[in-house]
Image (tube, rainbow, N blue to C red):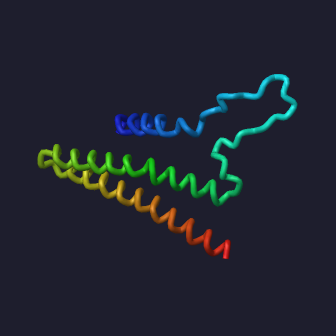
Amino acid sequence: MKKIALLLAIVFAFTSGSIALADLNPPSPSATNITLINPLGGGNSDISSVINNVMQWLIMAGSPIAALMVVVGGIQILTSGGEPEKFKKGRQTILYTAIGYGIILVGSGIISIVEKILTG
């Protein structure tokens, strides 16, 4: 379990780098106008676009993680050696991965439905 958590932390560290990038051309010290750069991107002026961007990121980051966890569950099943507890653990890994990714996909659909209802 510690190896999986470490792997997920590494994947998160490499995929979230674009969120934390700063402006590479800061204004000169003599500038009188200070502008703040939106860290979420230029088109995120309202809450719905921020929520949509977060959901797109979750789907994009969740897909490879879900595929990796299905492979991990399959390996657990293959290496169970006839032990029912290890086989059950592999099945649960695959089941919980499918449930988690399903929640992400259903969540994006619910957000779209609520947005359509609220915008008329």
Quadrant location of residue 117? bottom right
Q: In the rendered picture of this protein, how many numbered marks are placed on residues?
A: 0
Seen from the viewer's position, the closer of residues 66 and 92 is 66
| Residue 33 horizontal/vertical position (percent) | 85, 34
Rendering quarter of residue 4: top left
Residue at 20% of width from left, 51% of height from top?
87
Q: Is residue 113 left or right of residue 37?
A: left
x and y percentages locating residue 108 in the rendered image: 51, 62
Which corner quadrant holds the C terminus? Answer: bottom right
Image position, residue 11 (x, y; %): 42, 38
Residue at 60%, 56% (x, y): give it: 51
Q: Residue furthest right?
A: 32
Looking at the image, which residue sits at the far top?
29
Which of the pair 46/67 is nearer the observer? Answer: 46
* Residue 7 appears left or right of 117: left
Q: Residue at x 32, y 58 (%)?
A: 95
Report the residue at 32% width, 50% height from top: 67
Q: Is residue 75 left or right of residue 3?
A: left
Q: Residue furthest left?
A: 82
